Amino acid sequence: MNRVSGDFYSTRAVKDGFYWRTVRTYVGSWIIDRPTVQWAGCAVAISGQLRFWQGIHPVTTAVIRIPWNYTGIQPGTAVFRVGLDETSYTITYESDTFRDIRLELDYCSSVDVEPKVPVYGSRWHNNRPADTSDRVITIERAYREAGIGVTIDPVHTVIDDSAAGFVSWSPGELHDAMETAFSQFAGTWPAWKMWGLQAGSFDDPLTGGIMFDAAAGFGGAGEAPDRQGFAVFRNHEWFDNLVTETPTTQDEAWAMRHFLYTWVHEAGHAFNLLHSWNKSRPSSLSWMNYDYRYDAINGADTFWSRFYFRFDDEELIHMRHGDRAGVIMGADPWASGGHLESPADSTIQSEPGGPVELLLRSKSFFEFLEPVDIEFRLRNRTDAPLTVDQRLDPKYGNTTVFVQRPDGSRLTFDSVFCLSGIPEVVDLGPSADDGGTVGTDRLSVLVPLTYGARGFTFAIPGRYMIRAVYHGAGLLETSNTLNLTVGYPTDTSKDRFADNFLTREVGLTLALGGSKSPYLAAGFDTLQEASERFADDALGAKASIAVAQSIAPDFYRQDESTLVKFHSAEPENALELTEPAMRAYHESGGRAENLSYGGLVAMRASLLSEIGNTDAAANEAETLVDDLAERGVHENVLSDLRSSAADLRDS
């Protein structure tokens, strides 16, 4: 990559009881982008001007000289010059890799089976570059070829997930498992450590792998480290044909190749690598791309026929030479942008009159602290059916969301998750403007944007502007600009309550869709308090839904190495909690809240059916149909809701 980089540390002596010890403190990172390299018989000299990642620094140059002899590389010198001042350091050989990572792999007992880790022969599958080198690729080999040394711990924990009633992992349970796993690590963060879990199934069966970004910052893993862990779901259909021996069929080779890809891809996110298309490189032949996305642009089966099992050059520069805080686990948040990994700029524009329209809609005013959900609507503009990926939540990587805050600052909203899985495609009918049926040409998804990798998105009162870019199913479309206002607190009690509410624990509980993890107990308690104290406004209504989502299902967590039921489902209490919100949506008459209303009815219908009260579930579903009909909702949507209500009535 023709780069050289390094980190500066300061050292000082501190007294520890009767003894003195040396404390080393990280100061900052630098890079020389185009160094001059001069070779001699038994030495090399590398020189150039430093570029610092953080802060303002005077012009600094460096000359790094490394000698060697028949015994190997010898201690060298690094001389840094600022004006006439020089500082010299002795440098010694440590490793033949740029970074060294410790990876702990744990397994659920239900999937503690061979192969536990991927071992793939680069020529096993016929769909490959003809000139790809013949080699066996593992997780360690894939990262060593990128210049990263990965050591997998020889001892792993087996989590007994045979508890009665446990079927699949929820986001909250995975987050709790990560916290528990990292609570066993001594020392502080950040650190070159990551954790991978081979689990059975995820609540969303289409998801094959997940990277979770944020920690609770309480107990467990310590002070809010990020990008620590990921999981691979062994029961996903991708891995149905895995075999322990050398594959004898193309299906078996495909399964092992995708097993390797999923492990390497998810671990790549822990290095703060975004998906290729999020970096405006949708045709990158990288571990961080999706094969089906590449193929949608470049032709069927072209990704694997051209992929050499590597990261692209920009990713290699990031991992090897990027700002330490942007790369090391537990430092900068996910997608905070090390080196060249910044997402596509918010000024991106798609071609006018493209095949799809992406429209953002919401109510125009949100109360202070009120969680913010926004409707993302895709509409077919063509005169023929159009296939789209309907996973519009940013956690799936199909949409990039840009937010301008009241103070003029801009940020990219990034979910605390990054999910890899099978596209959830749907056919949109021809445009109603070209003879299609009104309503069948569009789909709407309610997207929560309250809390992401950078914290609370809408914590400051004032006016916000929001745009999004959709890049699914080979399409690229920029949305309208949505304006919304977050109100100022109208009473001092809510203003004071903000200190308790705007915390990581509350934000994560909301982002996880509820949790009973003890690591997030403070967040759950605060949401419960909000539901009671502000029962008459939108904050209280949405807080009650978050509390209900936390208590409605069973919650499983580790006790030693066994998964046990930590919380038993409370459907009746969840129904009681959400009754006021249900009435508020029924009485409001506001079209901007139709999706929220429908989502709450669906949640309550499931809970009512669970306790055997299907008549009440049907009544609420039928009331929803009547309310939405009065608000002018399209007939095809009403027809689907009527069918669901009839099924409840007949069950």
Image (cartoon, grey):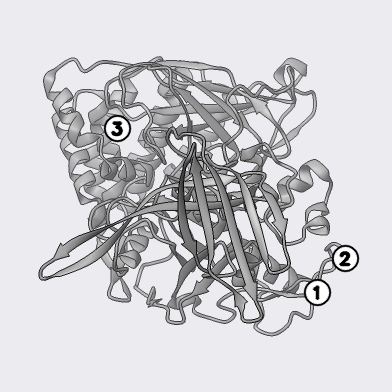
Q: Amino acid at mark 3?
A: Lys
Distance CA(mark 3)–CA(mark 2)? 57 Å
Residue 431 x, y percent position in the rendering? 72, 22
Q: Amino acid at mark 2?
A: Asp
Circle 2 residues within 10 Å: few <14, some 14–19, many ≥20: few
Residue 435: quarter of image: top right
Q: In front of the other: label 1 or label 3?
A: 1
For numbered disc 1, what is the local secondary structure?
loop
Q: Which residue is mark 3?
A: 542
Disc marking residue 102: none
- Whether residue 534 appears in this view of the structure is yes
Q: Which residue is mark 1?
A: 134
- Residue visible at 77% across and 18% down in the picture: 434
Q: Which residue is mark 2?
A: 131
As drawn, which residue projects farthest toward the bottom?
245
- Whether residue 208 appears in this view of the structure is no
For numbered disc 2, what is the local secondary structure?
loop
- Residue visible at 69% across and 31% down in the picture: 476
For numbered disc 3, what is the local secondary structure?
helix
